[in-house]
Image (spheres, rainbow, N blue to C red):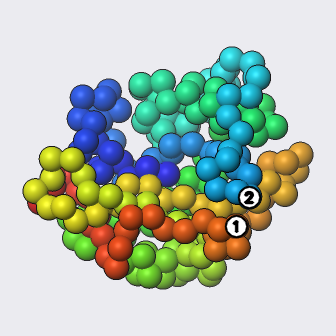
Amino acid sequence: MTVHPAFCAENMRRRECTNDNHRPLVIHGLWPERMQPRTYPHDCPAPALDLDPALALELADMMPGMADGLDKHEWRTHGGCAGLDDDEYYRHALELARRLDGALHATLTTRAGREITAGELRSTADMFSPGLGRTLTFHCRPLRDAQSRRPYLLEVRQCVDNDGLDGAPGTALACAVVKRRDQGCGASFMIAGVSLE
C-alpha cells in the first residue's frame, strides 16, 4: 500500500494525483516473494490484463494509479507470477487493501502532518484486529522538496502466506518470521498531509 499524500507530494503531475482522491492508503501491488528478501519472481508469462468491468470500477477506487497504467504494470511485473488469473489477483489485492484501510485510515488521516512511531501505528492496527500490527512493515524516507529532512511514511506492506485456495493469499504472517522489517523510519516518522511542512 502506498501512502498516497506522500507519493503525490513528489509526483504532482501524475494523473492519479490530479484526481480527487482523499485516501491515505492506496494499492500499489500484491507481490509474490521468496523467503530471501528482494528475490521475488517477476515478469512471468501471463495473458494481457483483461479485468471484469465491475471489478475494474471497484479497483479504481482503491488504486488511483490505474489512471497512469499501474494496474497493467503490476499485473505484468508481479501478478502473472502469482498463479492466479487477473480477476482473482486483483480481488485478493482489494480484500487485503480494504482491511488495511479499515485499520489505519482514521489514524493516517487524523495524524496527517504530524509525527508517529511504528509502535503507535502497530497498536492502531492491533485495535482493529489483534495481531495485525506484527504483519506490517513500514517504509519511510525524507521527501524531495520538503522543508524537513525527517522521514515520511511512504509504504505499508503486509506479509501474507500463499496458503489460500490454489495458492491465493491466505494467512497473515508475522513479518519478523519471514525476515521482513521496517526500513528508513527511525524512532518516529511523519505522516504526509495535503501540504508538507
Q: Residue at x 59, y 61 (%)?
A: 158
Give the residue number, with chain letter if any, for mark 1. 178
> Relative to residue 175, is residue 109 drawn left or right?
left
> Relative to residue 26, is residue 19 drawn left or right?
left
> Which of the pair 191/42 is nearer the observer?
42
Relative to 114, residue 197 above or below? above
Image location of residue 161, percent across then percent down: 76, 59
The disc placed on residue 144 is none
Residue 137, visible in the rendered structure: yes
Image location of residue 182, percent across then percent down: 48, 68
Q: Quadrant of residue 15?
A: top left
**What's under tag 1, amino acid-wise?**
Val
Label 1's element? helix
Which quadrant, please, contains the C terminus?
bottom left
Relative to 174, residue 82 above or below? above
Tags 1 and 2 in contact by the CB under 8 Å rule? yes
Image location of residue 88, percent across then percent down: 75, 38
Q: Quadrant of residue 7?
A: top left
Q: Residues within 10 Å of mark 2 (few under 14, many from 20)?
A: few
The disc placed on residue 35 is 2
Q: Residue at x 79, y 54 (%)?
A: 162
